[in-house]
Image (spheres, coloured by chain):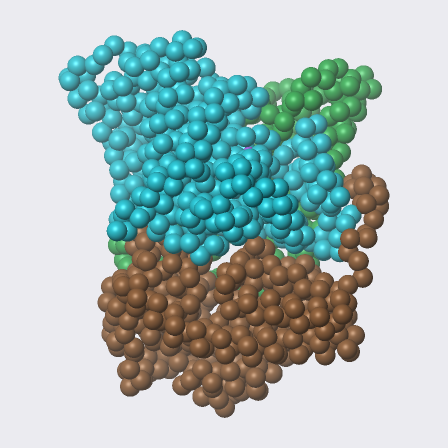
Chain colours: A cyan, B brown, C green
Amino acid sequence: MQILVLFGVFLITVFIGVPIGYSIALATLVVLAGFTNTPLAMITQNCVSGVNSFSLMAIPFFILAGNLMSTGGVAKRIVNFADTCIGWITGGLSLVTTAACMFFAAISGSAMATCSAVGAIMIPEMEKKGYPRPFSAALAASAGSIGVIIPPSVPFVIYGVVTGTSIGDMFIAGFLPGIMMGIAIMIACVVMSKKYGYQGASSKPTGRDVWISFKDAFWALLAPVIILGGIYAGIFTPTEAAVVAVIYSIFASVVIYREMTLKQLYAAFVDSVRLNGNIVFMVGTATAFASYLSLKQIPVLIAAFLTSLTSNPIILMLIINVFLLFVGCLMDNIPATIILSPILLPVALECGLSAVQFGVVLTMNLAIGFVTPPYGSNLFVATSISGVKIEAMLKYVLWFIGALLVVLMLTTYVPFFTQGIVEIING
Amino acid sequence: GSKDGSVSNAGGNGAAGSAKEIVLGHVYAEDHNINRASLQFKDYIEKESGGSMTVNIQPNSVLGGDEDMLEMCAYGTVTLMTPSVASLETYAADWGVLNLPYLYDSVEDAFEAADGELGDYLKSTLDGTEYICVGFNSNGTRNMSNNVRPITCIEDLKGIKMRVMNSSTYIKWMNALGANATPMGFNEVFTGLQQGTIDGQENGAAIAYTSGFNEVQKYFSVTEHVYDMNAIICNRAFYESLTDEEREIFDTGIRTYMEDWQRNTEVSEDGEYIAKWEESGCAVNYLEDDKKEAFREALTPLYEEAEANFPEAWEALSKYR
Amino acid sequence: MIEIPENTYTKMGKKENDMNGLKKITHRINKLEEVFLVATLAVCVVVIFVQVIARYVFNNSISWSEEGCKYLFVWMIWMGTDFAARDHLCIEIISGRVKGKAKLVLDIVVKLMWLGICLFFTFNGLEVVQSMMQRGKVASSIPWLKVWVVYLVMPVSQGMLSIRVIAQIAEDIMKIMGRGQLADGSV
Ligand code: NA
Ligand code: NA
């Protein structure tokens, strides 16, 4: 009954148009007041404690850096360089976007940060080269999901701590599936480009063309090297790296390229604080929602129900995948990981998966959830940076979800890609 | 709004029932001894009370860290919790004395102080608040690990970037020992060690091992600098709502499982986890007792400061040193 | 509501001419919020950057930087919900298909629900802050900072947002009653 009312209120309010972050809070409030003695103050407290996180701050900073890079001429040069190299292939720039997401994934542990960092740069640039905005937004949202699979990854660390799985092994295990997600999305890009007629934008380059565009893009190409190198050399945490990216892009666009006015700089800051207010705050209300579920042991009930359905491991894993995809439609990945991994892991172990493999499968399911409505954080980021409605993106997102589902099935049923690699590396 | 009201009335309050629900929240993994103690406490309470009290365990920080749960505990969302004593320092500054290193010579002295006058005094600092401290258990003997060199004497700590909790006392003493104290949230420590943002950390052997720090550390030094405690904190209104009979059962359950069983298990498992650090390839060394004197000397200004700021707590504590 | 302007800063500049008294006040509040939020973000950028420099160049950490920035961030986020009041993410599957007066009525219903939860946050937030003031909890690395100041953002931001939503509802009602000329269509 409680579950019915909870999801009922949430879905009804969301679909008639109440802001999504507030729908989550409203649904939690209704069940808390209606069915429990739990103090209502829990909601307000969680709304603050849920966003009181240093790691979360990477989001506005990467968005700011992305904004600065796309208005300050930095992104333009990266894109020109990439375009010179592979832009002539059918759908080349969409491949460039996917590759950029994979590259940022190696810097950032968060899908939203990856989506925003790459999306803010590439969506306007792709539009200039003739791609429809909804396609570019859908691509940035989908490829951004790779951010939590290619290490470092925040959900992997959380999963490792919650279940006692080696985090080092998780980081090894995520690498190949992350690359596979990138390849699957690239294949979808090429197929869609053929279907919808997106052409390569330029002619085949000469060596001289490549050298000229490389020289022009040198400072721009140095940016990811500094950020990536900085994190791996231990000079800064991801949040600090995001700040360094901001400072660097101000330096590059104001001092070196001299293509940014103070007014544009200010406008980029305004765009970032706006995003805090319409997206990041949802992490707070989602935390309250997750606390309620946990207090009422609702995830435990769901897990018991799952195991009562069948004893066939292949079917059971399929059910778990479908369930996780469903959860991903409604919930943020972090609270979902915290609540569900200890409950579902024993079921997965029984099905013959290793803890490491299941960690990647769970995270990938919830990563696909970043682009499934109604609650899809990458969709929100993509909407916010592109101005495209979510509904307009869905037609394209479906293609990418299809491609990612293939990788999900391979990761679920072929242990080699995760556990196998870990065993090879560990000897 | 008014709409909320109508829905809630239709639903009724039946689900809450008449049993008194103890929501027991903690930050430890399911196989950690605090969770195993919690499960035994749950069994005992539910059996002995004949169902008039139920225990709802919320492990693994699912409701948030100690600081978040302490706020929830003020309202009774969480009824019972075992926060590290360090997190109570921000509510009542006296608790900070427990965060100083090398206060005691043995873990037995530390437990004795907690069960004796020091514990009584600290409990009294929570009078008039929403909290009541019903006991103390062990958060492990804190040791240091790092990637620079084994800690064999105080000079070895010089310049090492050591992660500490967000506690002003920990920051102060770590700097006083010559290290470079870097406050950081627990969930960021693994990545910090892996990427070298920090060189080392200090924690109980068990929690550090189960969090995977052994994978990203070279040296484990048994410094035994703090015999760390958790306070067992209950929501005061809930505790006072218990009948005499229920309170008897509650108190016994706390003493038997959350205190005695947990402390014994923690102490006996400590050695096992140090062995696991060694097995996983870390160089383990034991800080010799006579080398601890130099640490105490460096900390003297902080001991004196604590004595001046918190005379009552310090006096109680000194009886067990 | 789902349409998010790319650069509202320049848009707001254009609107300045044809504004009545109420609009002017709203505009001034928006401007104040904007400057506050941008300044907060800029402070965080500077503090964290200085922290990185301090740690690597001077081998010295700033103990309060992480906690201080987190608290500024909490204020940034929740004040942002008021600043971004026009830009909140909504699914328009139903409301996008309704036209005319029916759409206005649906809008009012939606906004009443939104108002309900905003008012809850305002008053519940006040209770939480009051209770925290009694507990007197301080920030761990900034001992002079009382933590209720951080939670104060809930009643402040959600109270301001409530007023904004009430004004929007009032405007919708006027439109239904046929006095739509008051609105400039931007609500
Ligand atoms: Na990543
Ligand atoms: Na989703």
Of residues B36 and A283, the one nearer the viewer is: B36
The residue drawn where x is 61% and y is 78% is B256
Residue at the extreme front of the image, as rendered: A312
The x and y percentages for residue C152 are 62, 52
The residue drawn where x is 53% and y is 58% is B60
Place residue B3 in its image quadrant: top right
The residue drawn where x is 44% and y is 34% is A408
Horizontal side of C10 relative to C135 (left or right) equals left
Of residues B198 and C186, the one nearer the viewer is: B198
The x and y percentages for residue A265 are 41, 31
The x and y percentages for residue A271 are 49, 32
Is residue A403 among what the camera can see?
A: yes
Picture layout, residue C134 above or below residue B119: above
Is residue A377 among what the camera can see?
A: no
Horizontal side of C115 relative to A366 (left or right) equals right
How many labels sit on residues? Answer: 0
Horizontal side of B117 relative to A235 (left or right) equals right
Picture layout, residue B246 above or below residue A342: below
Horizontal side of A221 relative to A6 (left or right) equals left
The residue drawn where x is 34% and y is 33% is A179
